[in-house]
Image (cartoon, rainbow, N blue to C red):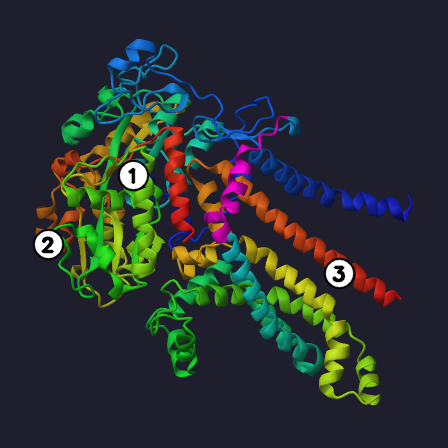
Amino acid sequence: MAHPRDGRGLTRRQLLARGGVAAAALSTTGLVAGCENTTEPVGSVGGGLSGEAAKLVVQKPLGPGGLPLPRPDNAVTWAITAENRPIKEGRPPERGPLRLYNYADYIDPGLVKRFQKQYGTSVQIATYNSADEAIAKLAAGAVAFDVIVGLTGSNIVNLIAQRLLQPLNHAYLPNLARNVWPELQDPFYDRGSRYTVPYVVWNDGIGWRNDKVAEDIAGMDVPWDVFWHSQAYRGRVGVLDDKRDALSMPIQRDAMRTGIRPDLNTEDKAVVDAAERELAQLAGICNVKVTITDYQTLPEAKTVLHHSWSGDLLSAAFYYLPKGVKADVLSFWAPDANGVVQNDFLCIGRNARSPVLAHRFLDFVLDEKNAYSNFVNFTGYTPPQKAIDAEALIKQGLIPRTLTAAVVRPDQFAANQELLQLSVQGERLWDDAWSRFKAG
Amino acid sequence: MSGRWTWRLLSLPGVGWLSVFFLVAFYAVLCVAFGNQDTLSQPVPFWNPLDWNVGYVLDVLRNIWHGGQYLTVLLRTLAFVAIAMALALLVGYPVAYFTARHAGRFRGLVLLGLIVPFWINYLMRMLAWINLLSPDGWGTRVLHDLGIERLFLWLGLLSTRGGWLDGQEATVVIALVYGYIPFLILPLYAALDRIDQRQIEAARDLGASPLSAFLRVTLPLSMPGILAGSVLVALPMFGDYYTPDLVSASTRTNMIGNQIDEFTRQGSEKVTGAVLTLLLALILLALMFYYLRSTRRAAAEHAA
């Protein structure tokens, strides 16, 4: 569920120590009295329908504050309230500076420079390492950010529940309707794009070195099986260091074998525990590594087979190839259906000081040329733009044919699933399983 | 103003600093561990000890009692730290001994050599090792040429040739030793340097062999240094999580610090993260207590 940028503090690119003590994560949500012996969260709400009426519908999981958790079959329209209305049309942009809150190295500095020039303003970028950190800082309200980049449909319930966003005025965002995939102009997590516009999309798949791995992975009946037959690559095999992505992998594998559509947002303990047991087998089979540094280790052949985010393979091809290694030694496969796809978004902070400029920035990023250059010059993550297509990129020689699958297609996006926020109990279920797996 | 008051005043900033950044922070961790979480999975600390909720602490203790994952990582952490500490002593003692006794006019240079690694960030040093120990790295080649690789393969501490970074316990332990050994050598050096040379000479004059003089005079007298050094390396090793992350990343080498990191960085179990932090603090406290008691006893014996 976490974003590919989550926890990237520990890379060569950044070299930041992750000082992780619980004290830093303190929230002061208030005192609750009563010495007790419970792990039932404070303020849990029954929520939803009750009594006889509840029997007439399939109950949907509820999130923080009893708000609905968005699902493709439970799309949510967030209300625009009287005290938090979008800005009026036709206002001139403010002078700035534009305060941008983003993952580190997650937007092309050249793009930011061009925006500064075009609007005669300056952009101040502050960075975060994880969505949790970002939301905690936004909620603390110490800095009024204008634009927030990189949060996902999993975070939106928190953002809305804590009233951290301001609604958008689409009059300032013509590029949304003009350029963006129709599917993401009206996403289930934010019907009508009232608070967000999409930034990039990615999917989960298998990245491998086709000069080191003999198997025809893309040609296998169940390509995920390759991990359970990877004895020959012991010590050079990795899975993503993310509980939701990693534990979803064996669930997808089982579903693919039996031909059933999996629920990757399940809160069924039996399913999650079984996934953990299957994943734990990999420790014996290939002494599996749990990392998110595949974008470095695959091109350097320190790993040869990795459960990967699509964007990582493209960054690997764009930036991380050692001298003498050609991009076409990297391969990527991802399922057409029933796998994991994700997208993140751009949004505007509730207390933005330059809201008009912020809208201009959103539209600027959604511009076809700008989105394209941000993709191929910097992030490696596909913007959901109608004009971008893998064939064209291959013809231009930007990416090798072996990485075609790393450019996410709209049909693939529609047939796969997003990993979304679960109920508190559901999150704990996955966290517990993950902690068991990580303990080896 | 008397001298006593001057010193009291001068110590105020330090005491204030420690109170704010240690005691308050520690109390906060305590209140999170004995608190609860809200429906956003964020911790809700219970500041009043009378309100404390033991649910999460019991959960962790139950897990350990039933041989769950926390016991696994705790035992692994204890084993890694114990072996790393023993290795560090084995390697560090002769270095400290040499520096204190035989380095002569090169003593300054040797000490400088010991301190220089501190100038480079710990992460940078570990990242350098990743390149050195990669299958075609220089370090791997040297280990191969010296026959060390073969020894490790024979002992079963390495599963494939050149596979130092393939998630090996041995690599993690060696990296821990490398990372923290200067903390052990320096106090040990200080202790050895303080030993009165005449006591050793007296032992030799009275007929003790060099070995017996070492075992009966030097070693006991350097005990405070051994203890101080061991505690100094054990404390950070216990909480380390980036070393296994960087040189292994296998689930089989994860330590208690990795679990804490996992829980506190993201996800819904920040309270459990705080409980594990507390558990670790208790272990370290026991270690500290043992150290203080031993040094006090040694000081008392010395005085007597």
- Residue at position x 48%, y 53% in the image: B73
Label 1 near label 2: C-beta < 8 Å? no
Q: Nearer the viewer, mark 2 or mark 1?
A: 1
Q: Are marks 2 and 3 on the same chain?
A: no
Residue A193's tag is none
Quote the CA–CA distance across marks 3 and 1. Answer: 52 Å
Quote the CA–CA distance across marks 2 and 1. Answer: 27 Å
Q: Is residue B173 above or below residue B16?
A: below
Identity of the amino acid at label 2? Gly
* Res A78 seen here: yes
The chain letter for the residue carrying disc 2 is A
- Residue at position x 15%, y 42% in the image: A258
Q: Depth check: A66 or B110 in front?
A: A66
Q: Which residue is mark 1?
A: A271
Q: Which residue is mark 2?
A: A219
- Residue at position x 20%, y 53% in the image: A225
Identity of the amino acid at label 1? Val
Q: Which residue is mark 3?
A: B294
The chain letter for the residue carrying disc 1 is A
Residue A264 at x, y percent in the picture: 26, 36
- As helix, strand or loop, the secondary structure at mark 2 comes to helix
Residue A234 at x, y percent in the picture: 30, 64
Chain part drawn in magenta: B51-73
Identity of the amino acid at label 3? Ser
First in sequence, mark 2 or 1: give its number.
2
